Image (spheres, helix red, strand yellow):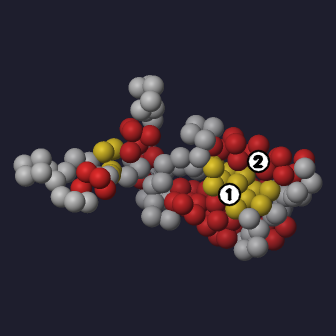
Amino acid sequence: FGGALTKLTGTDLATVASKAALSSGNIDPSVVDATYVGSIIPGAADAAYVSRHTALRCGVPQESPALTINRLCGSGFQSVICGAEQILLNEAQVTLCAGTENMSQAPLSVYGHKARWGAPLGAGLQLEDTLWSALTDSHTGL
């Protein structure tokens, strides 16, 4: 957190790891049937596309589907489960599965309902640390 990888997005990190995995397994990206990437905190403007962008940057065909999974701390593991299910169901022969996060890039937010129509005089805008709030279950308080 706050170290040498701070400036890399989650997509950047997933791409590096995925290219290395494909290379070490001697797998041509063109044979990947589906991509699954687990990620929780949208730390970059294009974070909604993390699975699609990771696949495309690795050379996976555009026609191959990509799914981003948010299952909190189990997101990366769930991506492996989804990929394995596709193979076991004979829906795919090769799946690319990853989990990624760059907690250093977790946004500071001002939510629209608190700012879009102005703030009361003297109240100012209060930033919320989404890294902290994402680790807190507002329903249970844990």
Q: Is residue 109 visible?
A: yes
SS class, disc 2: helix
Q: Is residue 18 visible?
A: no
Of residues 87 and 21, the one nearer the viewer is 87
Q: Residue at x 53, y 46 (%)?
A: 40
* Residue position for label 1: 67
How many marks the image carries: the answer is: 2
Q: Is residue 99 above or below residue 96?
A: above
40 lies left or right of 92: left
Residue 49 location, x and y as percent? 57, 63
Question: Which numbered disc covers residue 82?
Answer: 2
Split into 4 quadrants, where in the image is the N terminus? top left
**Which image quadrant is residue 91 in?**
bottom right
Give neighbour class at mark 2: few <14, some 14-19, many 20+ (Cα, 10 Å): some
Earlier along the polypeptide chain: callout 2 or callout 1? 1
Specify the amino acid type for callout 2.
Answer: Cys
Residue 118 location, x and y as percent? 18, 58
Residue farthest along the right direction in this orientation: 90
Q: Residue at x 33, y 44 (%)?
A: 129
| Residues under numbered marks 2 and 1 in contact, where contact means CB atoms less than 8 Å apart | yes
